[in-house]
Image (tube, grey):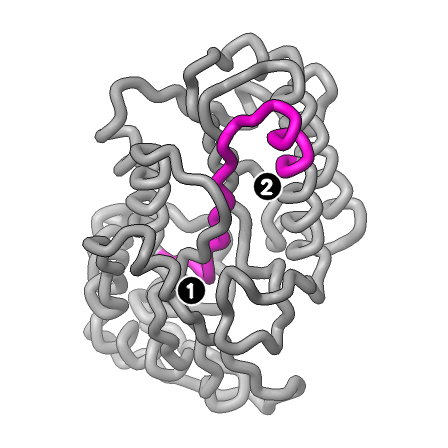
Amino acid sequence: MVWVRGRLASTVSLSSTDIDLCQPESVDALRGVLHENDSLVIISALTPDKGKDVGTCMRNIQMGKHFSTTLEHSHCGHVVYIGSDAVYDDNANPVQETSCASPTGLHGLMHFVREQMLKHVVQQTKVPLMILRPSLLYGAGDTHNGYGPNRFLRLAKEGQPITLFGGGEEKRDHVYVKDVSRVTGLCLRHRSEGILNVATGSSVSFFDIAQIAVRLSGTDAEIKCLPRSNPITHRHFDITANLKAFPSFRYTPMEFGLSETFKHLTRVDR
């Protein structure tokens, strides 16, 4: 959230080392740093690379219980919750904010449950709540190394083969992580409330992303294809709500975002 920090009067970033939201005592700890006119941005979650089991899901819901309990007893000025487009059915196309929330996995389910917790609380406290649902993210600082742009760039940089499922023909809407910060900053500035998907409106195949990664790397990294075990699914977004909310905002073109990410990877490894 560097973009946000650089444009707001005062910010406090809290990691799990500062306040562990999995622990009950986090309620009092968070209340101790939250003031009446503060805006609270919630991005805390155990991501799927940390576990896709019921236990991980329940720990995430426990976090939701604790920050929701905090908000029941501490009035702040604004809440922004950064969740995930995983709350939508995998077959929803094109995805809109009005699309039915019908998560097919535990990660999406826990985000939906946490959204409902927050909605319940702010109905009582009358604090404006903005729920952001980003699509797949890429960019500097990624620690997940999941299937997609960040992994492809790392592999290509090392000249290692990039392995795709099937022919890599599945299309997804990938969002540059700095754009999520920029959208968050706009929501904070306007004290926005409601639900907004964070997506570019342009879906690109994994094969095309792999090709860009190899081209940027300047290596001879090979693109390999594994036999497909699951049906092909695409995800597209209708970003009309984005355009109406922030008419002058423009998402970073994928090739430029990948280039910036690759430059960061190169600097880090020097």
**Mark earlier in primary sequence (2, 1):** 2
Q: Which residue is mark 1?
A: 151
Q: What secondary structure is found at the residue carrying circle 1?
A: helix
Between 133 and 59, the residue placed more toward the observer is: 133
Relative to 167, 73 lies left or right: right
Q: Is residue 179 above or below residue 207?
A: above
Q: Is 125 part of what is drawn in magenta?
A: yes
Mark 1 Cα-neighbour bin, 10 Å: few <14, some 14–19, many ≥20? some
How far, Cα to Cα, is label 2 from label 1? 21 Å
Q: Quadrant of residue 19?
A: top right
Amino acid found under the numbered disc labelled 1? Arg
> Residue at the location (49% across, 66% down)?
96
Question: Magenta residues?
Answer: 118-138
Q: Which residue is mark 2?
A: 45
Q: Position of residue 180 (x, y in %)?
A: 36, 49
The residue lying furthest to the top in this view is 32
Q: Is 221 part of what is drawn in magenta?
A: no
Amino acid found under the numbered disc labelled 2? Ala
> Residue at the location (48% across, 83% down)?
170
Relative to 148, 119 lies left or right: right
Q: Which mark is residue 259?
A: none
Q: Position of residue 125 (x, y in %)?
A: 60, 23
Between 138 and 106, the residue placed more toward the observer is: 106
